[in-house]
């Protein structure tokens, strides 16, 4: 960039990687990585699927390559397919749901609790993906 020039928008680090989707994904869905290094929808209901690696940055067809965001601020104009509502609740914590791939503001009462992040606006989620905390049975 030439001296004196400025950027027109905010700068943010994007942490992530490309992976093969082994299922159909919607943007914003939580995923875990399989032993075959493919991504599938994460779920809080089972130990094997509760370790969230990130969120799908875009919709992906079966066997398509998709960017998985692992850190930073995640933007979606419409969160319906990932969180059940079009907008996020500002200041609310979002957790992995027992429903595969989805996020929820209500921590599950069975399986594992996995904090995904906190809504910093109605369209932006600050990712702070935690390791699963197994709930007592």
Image: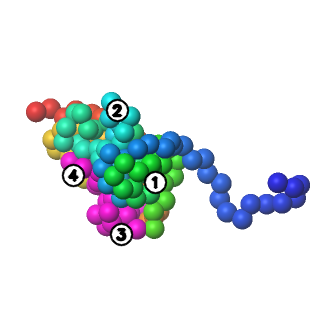
18 drawn magenta: no
Marks 2 and 1, Cα distance to the nearest angstrom? 20 Å
Q: CA distance from mark 1 to mark 3?
A: 16 Å
Say which label, 2 or 1, has the lower sequence index.
2
Q: How many marks?
A: 4
Dot 1 or dot 4, earlier in sequence: 1
Q: Secondary structure at mark 2?
A: loop
Q: Name the residue that disc number 2 marks.
A: 36
What residue is disc 1 on? 57
Quadrant, the C terminus: top left
Q: Are marks 3 and 2 in contact (CB under 8 Å)?
A: no
Could you tell which of marks 3 and 2 lies nearer the N-terminus?
2
Q: CA distance from mark 4 to mark 2?
A: 23 Å
Which residue lies at the image location 50% right of the left edge and 42% below the top edge? 17
Q: Is residue 47 visible?
A: yes
Question: Which quadrant holds residue 36?
Answer: top left
Is the residue marked by circle 4 packed among few (<14), some (14-19), or many (20+) residues within 10 Å? few
Q: Which mark is residue 99?
A: 4
Q: Nearer the viewer, residue 18 or 114?
A: 18
Tell me if residue 82 is in the magenta stretch: yes
Point out which mark residue 86 bears.
3
Q: Main secondary structure of the magenta part?
A: loop
């Amino acid at each position: 960039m030439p001296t004196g020039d400025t950027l027109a928008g905010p700068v943010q680090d994007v942490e992530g990687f490309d992976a093969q989707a082994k299922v159909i994904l919607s943007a914003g869905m939580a995923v875990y990585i399989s032993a075959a290094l493919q991504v599938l929808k994460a779920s809080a209901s089972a130990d094997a699927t509760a370790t969230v690696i990130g969120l799908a940055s875009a919709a992906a067809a079966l066997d398509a390559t998709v960017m998985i965001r692992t850190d930073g601020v995640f933007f979606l104009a419409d969160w319906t397919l990932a969180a059940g509502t079009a907008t996020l609740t500002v200041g609310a914590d979002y957790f992995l749901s027992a429903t595969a791939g989805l996020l929820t503001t209500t921590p599950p009462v069975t399986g594992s609790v996995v904090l995904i992040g906190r809504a910093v606006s109605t369209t932006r989620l600050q990712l702070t993906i935690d390791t699963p905390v197994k709930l007592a049975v």
